[in-house]
Image (spheres, helix red, strand yellow):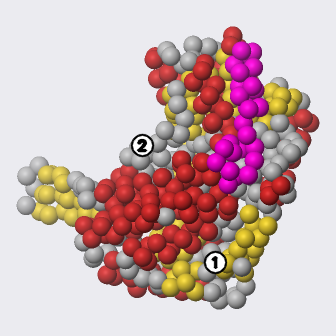
Amino acid sequence: MKRILNFIDGEFRPPCSGRYLPDVEPATGQVIAEIAESGPDDVDAAVAAASRAFESWRRTPAEERSRLLIRVAELLDENFDELARLESEDSGKPIALARRLDVPRAVRNFRFFATAILHAETPCHMTDDRALNYTIRQPLGVAGLISPWNLPLYLLTWKIAPAIAAGNCCVAKPSELTPLTADRLAALTREAGIPPGVVNIVHGPGGSAGRALTSHPKVPLISFTGGTKTGADVMAQAGPLFKKVSLELGGKNPNIVFADADLDQAVATSIQSSFANQGEICLCGSRLFVEKTIYDEFLERFLEGTKKLRIGDPLDDSTDVGALVSEAHRRKVEGYVALAKEEGGRVLVGGKRPGSLPERVRDGYFLEPTVISGLDCRRRVMQEEIFGPVVTVTPFDSPEEAIDYANGTRYGLSASVWTQDLQKAHRVAAAIESGTVWVNTWLLRDLRVPFGGMKESGVGREGGFESLDFFTEAKNVCVRL
Ligand code: NDP
């Protein structure tokens, strides 16, 4: 059985506890690896290695850091097929999605920040003729990076690349549910020539390894992506130590379709935005609002398309919908389907475990894509993040009503708006309380733009130069003339 060890100071090391946790393949329910069950001692060792490496890494010229990061991107690309397979096996996502989204994005993350640091600028201000004020940006030291299971390699590289590009060293804690690609990434950073201690990866449960990182006095910066409840705990640990914190949290994203939308595009993309990665993407549009005059037509086409999605072995190239990440998570999602019925909702399609599955994956954690109508927007199913293949549909009368519905949750991560009326698109986009609004599209990402959530979907923005800002401290030097 493969053992996933910690990666500390450029070496793979067993956990101090000597204990391992099972890593289960969601599509089969079988244990495919054992993962280090790390705790505070392992985090201490990783932080010590990162602190030692920081002294020389911070002085490594930007061009050299850039060259090493580009080498990591090349190696990720060279190992594309293996990474896609590992990502699919470990998380249950269709391999086609890992090929289209996860692995290419991991490559882009490294390339993007490798080149961004060559173009970073800092401002200089003349204060009348009395002084010259300039800003320098310096890395902070050891960055603590905590990432979830839904886009394991994509989100881990989205943190590691800017952190080390900016001159920090890092200790990353991937989700214990999906350690496989993080483990490969560790080996590839070493192969690329990233010096020992610059990238450290500690595996294990969030409550021990993750918390040891958020509460570690020598880790001045935490970048966290995960659930809102966990985000609150991260803040509670990091706050009293005055750490710099970025939180990318949950969402309950509205997808608003106006009567004047291009229906072919709106239907096709809404099926994607509802069910891609089994709905386990923080940016999925889990609340669909459709203007009343086209509600019936839209719904008919949306349900027809949903029924055509192929549920099956994630390793099969033709699969659209794979397995949910764990048995416990499937139970949680099924609980919300049951709750929807109690709350007066109607399950229009799905809501069940698929009847027939290929032999290899017959015991996997699958659930049919599910569409629910008839719920009041204040009900729990329309308020709480489900993070599974479940979408609600609700008709609306006017742009004002759509905006009210859209803004009527504690979340504010992303939204989609479908209309061909330019003015309406701009007006509605400005009124929606979310960090990203897509107009006539979904999940189209430009890595230069700020990314993050409003309200309880997060604190801070990452992306582009904002990530480089986050991973550095600005210092003002004022010189009297
Ligand atoms: P969790 O919040 O459960 O876990 C996220 C990470 O935090 C994991 O590595 C986890 O470790 C770790 N962790 C758990 N408890 C603690 C703790 N007390 N202190 C420190 N670290 C801890 O989220 P999920 O992994 O379940 O991911 C799904 C969530 O992530 C959804 O809410 C989704 O919306 C959100 N998300 C947000 C994104 C965004 O950009 N806004 C993008 C993607 C996902 P372990 O798993 O090993 O316990």
Q: What residue is shown at x 83% (from left), y 48% (from top)?
A: 357
Q: Is residue 306 magenta?
A: yes
Q: Nearer the viewer, mark 2 or mark 1?
A: 1
Could you classify mark 1 by the number of other residues whose Cα lies within 10 Å: few (under 14), some (14-19), or many (20 or more)?
many
Residue 354 x %, y %: 85, 44
The magenta-colored residue range is 295-321
Please tell me which of labels 2 and 1 falls first in the chain.
1
Distance from the alpha carbon under mark 2 to that under mark 1: 33 Å
Badge 2 element:
loop
User: Which residue is nearer to you in this view: 83 or 11?
Assistant: 83
The reply to whether residue 431 is visible in this rendering is: no
Q: Is residue 45 magenta?
A: no
Q: Position of residue 99 (x, y in %)?
A: 55, 51
Q: Residue at x 60, y 21 (%)?
A: 264
* Quarter in which the C terminus is drawn: bottom left
Give how far across and how far down residue 197 sits, in percent: 44, 81
- Residue extending farthest top: 293
Mark yes or no: residue 145 visible.
yes
Residue 340 occupies which quadrant of the picture? Answer: top right
Q: Is mark 2 within 8 Å of ligand 1?
A: no
Q: Image point 68% across, 13% down: which residue?
A: 294
The answer to which image quadrant residue 397 occupies is top right
Q: Which residue is mark 1?
A: 4
Q: Is residue 205 left or right of residue 337?
A: left
Quadrant, the N terminus: bottom right
Residue at image coords 50%, 59%: 80
**Residue 40, relative to residue 176: is it above or below?**
below
Tell me the number on the disc at residue 446.
2
Amino acid type shown at disc 1: Ile
In the displayed structure, does residue 91 sit left or right of residue 466?
Answer: right
